[in-house]
Image: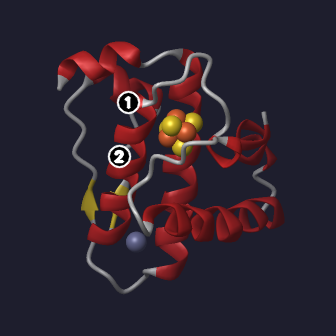
Amino acid sequence: MSRIFDRLDNKKKREIKVLADFISVYCRQNHRDDSKEALAISDDRLRRSLDGKRLMLCPECSQLLHHGIAKLLLCPYDPKPACKKCPTHCYAPGYRERVRKVMRFSGPYLIKHGRFDLVFHYLR
Ligand code: SF4
Ligand SMILES: [Zn+2]
C-alpha cells in the first residue's frame, strides 16, 4: 500500500485536499446527527497534504473520501486530467454520483460563506 503513496505528486495532493474539504463541509451540513470519527490516515505524506487536519466524518463520507483518495493515487494518467473531464471514470458505480452531489452542495456553500480560497483550488 505504501508504494501507491509514491505517486502523490503536487497535483494529486491538491485534488485530495479539495476532495477532503468538500466532503468535510458536506458531512458537517448534511449528516449533523450521524456519529463521526476522525479519518484514519496512515501515511505521513498524505496527512501533510491534508494540512495535518483531523477530519471528523460519518462512515458514509469517510468511505467516499477513502475511495476518492485511492482512485486519485492509482490514476493511470500522467499528466492527470480533471476527473470531471476524464474519458475513463474509474470510480466504482455510485461513487461518481456521490462525489458530484458533494461538489454541487459544497461549492456554492463555500462561496456563500466566503471560502473562496477553498473553491479556488477546485477551479484551478
Ligand atoms: S476519474 Fe480519470 S482522472 Fe480521475 S482518478 Fe479516475 S482515471 Fe484518473
Ligand atoms: Zn457524512
Which is more foreground, mark 1 or mark 2?
A: 1
Mark closest to the chain's N terminus, 1 or 2: 2
Specify few, some or many for label 2: CA neighbours under 10 Å numbering under 14, 14-19, or 20 or more.
few
Say if disc 1 is inside 8 Å of ligand 1.
yes
Q: Compared with residue 6, is residue 22 higher up or lower down, i.e. above or below? A: below
The part of the image, by quadrant, that contains residue 104 is bottom right
Reading the image, the residue beneath label 2 is: 54
Spatial CA distance of label 1 from label 2 is 24 Å
Badge 1 is on which residue? 74
Q: Nearer the viewer, residue 15 or 108?
A: 15
Provide the secondary structure element on which disc 1 rests: helix
Q: Residue at x 52, y 61 (%)?
A: 96
Residue at 54% x, 23% y: name it: 77
Identify the residue at image location x=26%, y=77%.
35
**Badge number at residue 58:** none
Q: In which image quadrant can residue 79 be found?
A: top right
Looking at the rendering, in which quadrant would you find the C terminus?
A: top right
Give, as a three-letter code, the residue at label 1: Leu
Left-right relation of 25 to 6 = right
Residue at position x 55%, y 63% from top?
A: 25
Relative image position of residue 102 (x, y in whole percent): 58, 66
| Rendering quarter of residue 42 | top left
- Name which residue type carries label 2: Arg
Tell me the element at label 2.
Answer: loop
Q: Is residue 16 visible?
A: no
Name the side, left or right, on which 88 lies relative to 42. Answer: right
